[in-house]
Image (cartoon, rainbow, N blue to C red):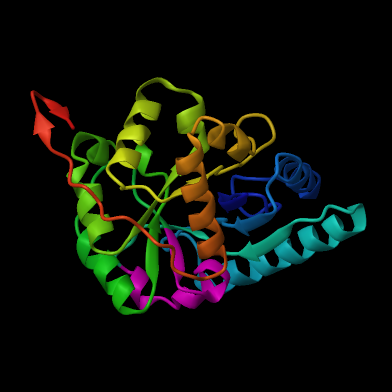
Amino acid sequence: MTDLHCHLLPGIDDGAKDLDVSLKLLRMERTSGVQALMLTPHFYYERNELKHFAEQREEAYRQMTRAAAEKGVEIGTKLGAEVYFSPALPHLDLSLLAFDGGPYLLIELPTTHHPGGIEETLYEIQQEGYIPILAHVERYPYVTEDPRLLYHWVRAGCLAQVNAAGLIRSGKTAQLIRHYIRWNLVHLLCSDAHSPGHRPPNLREGFDTLDAETARYFRDNAEAVYAGEEPELPEPIEPKKRLWQWV
């Protein structure tokens, strides 16, 4: 398996607090069957200076990879970021934030409000040559209330990612994610791991909730994105509302 969204770098964000925790998380990922990781620490335009962030990330990565080699933890890793939405994003050097300097950019939207200008910003990012991946789309209330938003973003060329925890916990979130899957509106399943206890690597458990065809689809997509290639995606289906329910 390939995990494209996790916070394992030591001491750089709200993920692994130090090198010991980082190594523990790496071992948990490897033991669960993950062979490749995209390391995606949080980046906030309003809080971080981009060059300084890139330098901090590189130093944390050197520390982690050196310690992993010394401890015999063998797992493939590349650098990316989870980039918080801002209309300023198209004007930054996105090569410093994209997955391994390639075409994919993981973008986190606000959970508290629906910001204006999402469509325009995503379009401008695409015009710069990048493919937005919308992080954990099951967490945005405005998308839950109107999944046609997600349909239009995907239709316009974005990819969408969901967290394994949403499927593992079952309930309404799992039902929502399964609707998104049925509508071809999500393409990637990731762990979004932050810590060994509260938010652990759980990609295996997430995949275990899926049928074989869907699991293979998510695995193939993740491998393609990790390699900087384009996955083969089905046409999205526009959600329809009938009797106050989306179908």
Q: Position of residue 44 (x, y in %)?
A: 45, 59
- The residue drawn where x is 45% and y is 67% is 104
Residue 120 left/right relative to 185: left
Image quadrant where residue 39 sits: bottom right
Q: How many marks?
A: 0
Relative placement, left or right, of 192 versus 241 is right
- Residue furthest to the left: 243
- Residue 202 colored magenta? no
- Residue segment shown in magenta: 88-106
Q: Residue at x 26, y 43 (%)?
A: 113
Residue 226 sits above or below residue 206 on the image? below
Q: Position of residue 59 (x, y in %)?
A: 72, 67
Q: Residue 146: tell me if it is visible.
A: yes
Q: Is residue 71 left or right of residue 149?
A: right
- Residue occupying the far front of the picture: 213
Above or below for 102 versus 41:
below
Q: Residue at x 32, y 73 (%)?
A: 126
Q: Is residue 124 left or right of residue 136?
A: left
Towards the viewer: 86 or 70: 70
Residue drawn at (36%, 33%) of the image: 178
Q: Where does the image place residue 49, in percent across and percent down from the top left?
A: 51, 69
| Residue 140, visible in the rendered structure | no
Quarter of the image where the C terminus is located? top left
Query: Magenta includes 98?
Result: yes
